[in-house]
Image: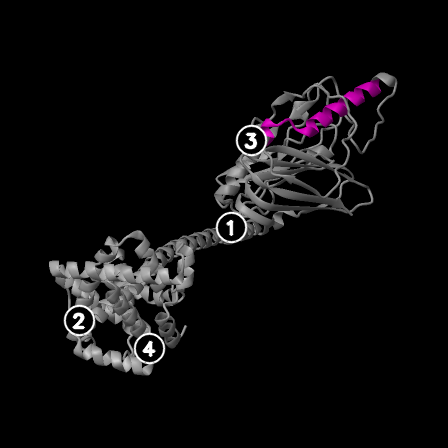
């Protein structure tokens, strides 16, 4: 055993290169002559080689596991990045195409406003004739329909003429009130449907000017009580103003039934005007109506409005009621996640002194927010 | 990492070299998959080719005439062809024609002999006791000094540790001889 161990030690010394030159030469000579020693050297060499290879193999297997795991993570990350990129591109695409859609809509609307295919039909109400009794206002206020003189051929399928602002027959100005809405062939489907909606809304909603007319009537009545002896001044050039009785008669031409008399809603007590809104205002597109008030002085000439929206998605309408009772309507554009300013929503009006009422009507499921600025100069 | 550095680190059995060698793995995996293999086949073939390089690089007469990556790929192709032959799969030989000139029959025989010898050794080492395996591992793989091994394994002196190592080697030789007789 001892001899065997000595041989192993000697072979190890040889394989590790720890022998001196003379020792090595002597050992190699022995190797040539002694086959048993040669086998022993080969075996020991194989053992050492095997041990190193086995160790290397273990390292390889360990590394392979790490490599596969890293590869998996790399694939996952690249997949996530790729997916993220697709989402970003998708959103960018939505924004891009939405902007195009908005631009198209704006240009379409411009064409509509610049060159109206459908000419408006103007209803001029004739002031009541002098000496007409108050008890028969329906007859005296029959509107006279005068088509515009140079009226081109109409393309509209249907034309609805509203004259809902005529309420006080004794005011000749009110007879000039007119509102015309077109539902025609040449309009886009969306505009047509919106206008239909507007028409419905106007029909259903009690007109604020009606309430104002009844207030006027009540005031006049009160005056009559205070000054019973006062006689109305007779002006030969102007027809005498007809006196108002208990009921104010309103001509509702919009209903399509000409000459139909409708009883005015009961008179509402006059309340102080609501405080003016501090503009600009920012709000979320919340379902329902939100009203803002703008006070316009007599010195002001113009009223400017700016309506901007951010990440807007859905439909909204803006109604502007002027102090004289006229209502302006801005068609709410539908857009899918848009940000910006629609030029249509920056209108300018002639300043009419008094309180202007701006109502933002938000439809269902609308998201995003808007900023409204209104000023008079 | 340059080829020269790779070979030098491989000679020293440095762990860092494996990452550099694994850069050649994706083309090998593609090749094996293309010729009917799977990821596991690719891994086996690739690791075997690295072992061949590891063994060859320690030979004094070894000289690499091409890049390490190309060498690995060619060895892998050869090995996969060999495996396919064993599996009796019919494949197009156009991809393997070039290999015939690059890898000689002697190399093939040498590799087979080594594989057999390694198989025997693996079995023999498994039959060794745990202490012996530890001594051999510490000395030949982790390259620890006999003093450190003596301290780690609680031997009284360096001489005792040395004797223990020689005894383990003698025991291993005996097991190998027994196995060779059986074969």
Which element type, helix, strand or loop, lies under badge 3?
Answer: helix
Height in image: A22 above or below A337? below
Q: Nearer the viewer, mark 3 or mark 2?
A: 2
Q: Name the residue located 38 percent from the left edge and 65 percent from the top edge.
A: B143
Same chain assignment for discs 4 and 3: yes
Are labels 3 and 2 assigned to the same chain? yes
Image x and y of residue A35, in percent: 16, 74
Which residue shows up at 59% across the image and 47% down it?
Answer: A150
Circle 4 or circle 1, nearest the eye: 4
Q: Chain of mark 1?
A: A
Q: Earlier in the sequence, mark 1 or mark 2?
A: 2
Query: Alpha-carbon distance for marks 1 and 2?
Result: 90 Å
Residue A329 spot, x, y in % from top left: 62, 39
Q: Which class describes the residues within 10 Å of circle 2: few (<14), some (14-19), or many (20+)?
A: few
Residue A9 among magenta residues = no
Task: List the residue tagged with mark 1.
Answer: A98
Q: Earlier in the sequence, mark 3 or mark 2?
A: 2
Disc with the residue nearer the chain's start (4 vs 1) = 4
Mark 4 to mark 3: distance in Å?
112 Å
| Apparent side of residue B87 relative to residue A57 in the rendered image (left or right) | left
**Magenta region, residue range:** A202-224
Alpha carbons under labels 4 and 2: distance apart: 20 Å
Q: Are marks 1 and 2 in contact (CB under 8 Å)?
A: no
The residue where tag 4 is placed is A19
Structural distance between the alpha carbons of marks 4 and 1: 86 Å
User: How dense is the environment of label 3, judged by Cα within 10 Å: few (below 14), some, or many (20 and up)?
Assistant: few
The tag on residue A293 is: none
- SS of the residue at dot 2? helix
């Amino acid at each position: 055993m001892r001899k065997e161990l000595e041989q192993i030690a000697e072979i190890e010394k040889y394989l590790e290169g720890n022998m001196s030159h003379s020792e090595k030469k002597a050992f190699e000579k022995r190797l040539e002559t002694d086959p048993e020693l040669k086998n022993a050297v080969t075996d020991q060499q194989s053992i050492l080689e095997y041990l190193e290879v086995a160790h290397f193999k273990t390292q390889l297997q360990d590394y392979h596991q790490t490599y596969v795991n890293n590869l998996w993570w790399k694939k996952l990350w690249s997949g996530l990045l790729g997916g993220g990129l697709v989402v970003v591109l998708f959103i960018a695409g939505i924004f891009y195409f939405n902007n195009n859609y908005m631009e198209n809509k704006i240009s379409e609307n411009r064409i509509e406003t610049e060159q109206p295919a459908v000419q408006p039909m103007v209803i001029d109400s004739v002031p009541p004739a002098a000496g007409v009794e108050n008890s028969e206002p329906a007859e005296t206020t029959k509107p006279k329909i005068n088509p515009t003189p140079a009226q081109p051929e109409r393309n509209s399928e249907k034309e609805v003429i509203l004259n809902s602002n005529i309420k006080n027959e004794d005011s000749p100005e009110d007879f000039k009130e007119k509102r015309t809405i077109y539902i025609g062939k040449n309009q886009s489907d969306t505009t047509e449907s919106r206008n239909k909606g507007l028409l419905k809304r106007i029909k259903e909603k009690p007109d604020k000017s009606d309430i104002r007319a009844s207030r006027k009537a009540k005031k006049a009545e009160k005056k009559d009580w205070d000054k019973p002896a006062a006689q109305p001044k007779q002006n030969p050039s102007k027809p005498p103003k007809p006196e108002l009785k208990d009921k104010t008669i309103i001509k509702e031409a919009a209903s399509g039934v000409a000459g139909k008399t409708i009883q005015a809603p009961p008179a509402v007590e006059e309340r102080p005007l609501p405080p003016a809104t501090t503009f600009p205002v920012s709000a979320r597109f919340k379902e329902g109506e939100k009203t803002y008030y703008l006070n316009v002085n007599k010195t002001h000439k113009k009223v400017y409005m700016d309506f901007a929206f951010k990440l807007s998605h859905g439909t909204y309408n803006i109604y502007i009621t002027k102090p004289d009772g006229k209502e302006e309507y801005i068609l709410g554009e539908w857009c899918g996640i848009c940000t910006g300013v629609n030029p249509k929503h920056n209108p300018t009006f002639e300043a009419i002194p008094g309180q202007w009422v701006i109502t933002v009507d938000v439809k269902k499921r609308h998201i995003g927010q808007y900023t409204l600025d209104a000023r008079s100069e | 990492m340059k080829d020269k550095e790779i070979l030098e680190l491989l000679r020293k059995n440095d762990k860092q070299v494996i990452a550099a060698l694994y850069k050649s793995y994706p083309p090998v995996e593609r090749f094996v998959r293309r010729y009917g293999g799977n990821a596991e086949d690719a891994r086996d073939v690739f690791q075997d080719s690295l072992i061949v390089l590891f063994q060859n690089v320690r030979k004094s007469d070894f000289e690499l005439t091409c890049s390490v990556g190309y060498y690995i790929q060619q060895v892998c192709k050869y090995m996969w062809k060999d495996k396919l032959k064993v599996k009796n799969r019919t494949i197009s030989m156009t991809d393997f024609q070039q290999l015939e000139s690059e890898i000689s029959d002697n190399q093939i025989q040498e590799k087979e002999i080594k594989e057999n010898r390694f198989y025997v050794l693996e079995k023999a080492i498994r039959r060794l006791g745990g202490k012996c395996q530890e001594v051999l591992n510490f000395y030949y793989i982790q390259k620890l000094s006999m003093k450190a091994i003596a301290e780690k394994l609680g031997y009284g002196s360096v001489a005792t540790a040395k004797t223990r190592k020689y005894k383990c080697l003698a025991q291993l030789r005996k097991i190998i001889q027994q196995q060779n007789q059986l074969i």
